[in-house]
Image: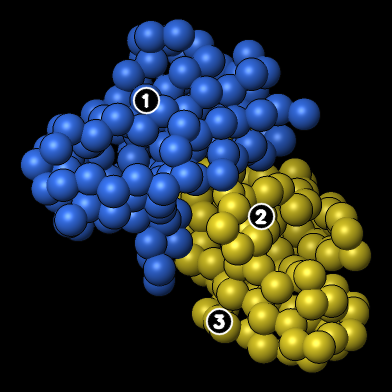
Chain colours: A yellow, B blue
Amino acid sequence: GNSVTQMEGPVTLSEEAFLTINCTYTATGYPSLFWYVQYPGEGLQLLLKATKADDKGSNKGFEATYRKETTSFHLEKGSVQVSDSAVYFCALGKAAGNKLTFGGGTRVLVKP
Amino acid sequence: DVKVTQSSRYLVKRTGEKVFLECVQDMDHENMFWYRQDPGLGLRLIYFSYDVKMKEKGDIPEGYSVSREKKERFSLILESASTNQTSMYLCATDRDRTSSGGYTFGSGTRLTVV
């Protein structure tokens, strides 16, 4: 079946540092890939997505590239802010028929 | 913007009570989902629905049921609440089965069973 593995946190960074959160997946076919963000006390928000190999999703300074050869979708941001402190979830879904499978989440804490 | 509204942010119930968690969406989405979120376990799918009066079990349906009498409302029911059902419950929606756009989530209901 489908599965998503992402690095465990917490990840603690200083402001303006570079952030990488690793995500790898197992799936049949050609799934869509997503990153969601959950700020304290809130539900999840879609951060970015990619629907086919080599696609790059980007939003709010975050980027992730769909790498089919390494079955990965790592999230990166070049210069984090305190406001980026949150839990980040990697997820995959089939291209049609769309139950999403989520990773365990990675907590990120950015210190001033 | 699609809005997904969960009726309560925080809820405290007693063991053995029947508990209803409500989710309402305003964008005519066909698909609705209930997840629970627990530390270290991520999000786990409880039940989902692709249409009115239709429901399917997710990965952890035991101890739960659902109701979808109207397209915009998807209710999660804990038949007899137990302490191991203390969790954050998240409702999500998606347009339809052909969509690959990802979910829209509600703000969550943090349920404590004492």
Characterize the local packing of mark 2: few (<14), some (14-19) or many (20 or more) Cα atoms within 10 angstroms: many
Residue that badge 1 annotates:
B75
Answer with the quarter of the image where residue B25 lies.
top right
Residue at horizontal 67 percent and vertical 18 percent from the top: B27
**Label 2 secondary element:** strand
Spatial distance from mark 1 to mark 3, Cα to Cα?
Answer: 33 Å
Marks 2, 1: nearer the viewer: 1
Residue at horizontal 70 percent and vertical 27 percent from the top: B2
Residue at horizontal 12 percent and vertical 48 percent from the top: B15
Residue that badge 3 annotates:
A9
Tag 1 near tag 3, CB within 8 Å? no
Q: Which chain carries label 3?
A: A
Q: In this view, does A44 lie to the left or right of A48?
A: left
Query: Residue B73: where, in percent of width, then height?
Result: 47, 18
Q: Quadrant of the C terminus of chain A?
A: bottom right
Spatial distance from mark 2 to mark 3, Cα to Cα?
Answer: 15 Å
First reached walking from the N terminus: tag 2 or tag 3? 3
Q: In this view, does B46 lie to the left or right of A6?
A: left
Are the residues under marks 2 and 1 on the same chain? no
Above or below for A37 versus B109: below
Q: Which of A36 and A26 is in front in this view?
A: A36
Question: The residue under label 3 is which amino acid type?
Answer: Gly
Q: Furthest-left residue in view?
A: B16
Residue that badge 2 annotates:
A36
Spatial distance from mark 2 to mark 1, Cα to Cα?
Answer: 24 Å
Question: The residue under label 1 is which amino acid type?
Answer: Ser
**Label 3 secondary element:** loop
- Whether residue B97 is visible here, answered yes or no, is no
Q: Which chain carries label 2?
A: A
Above or below for A111 versus A20: below
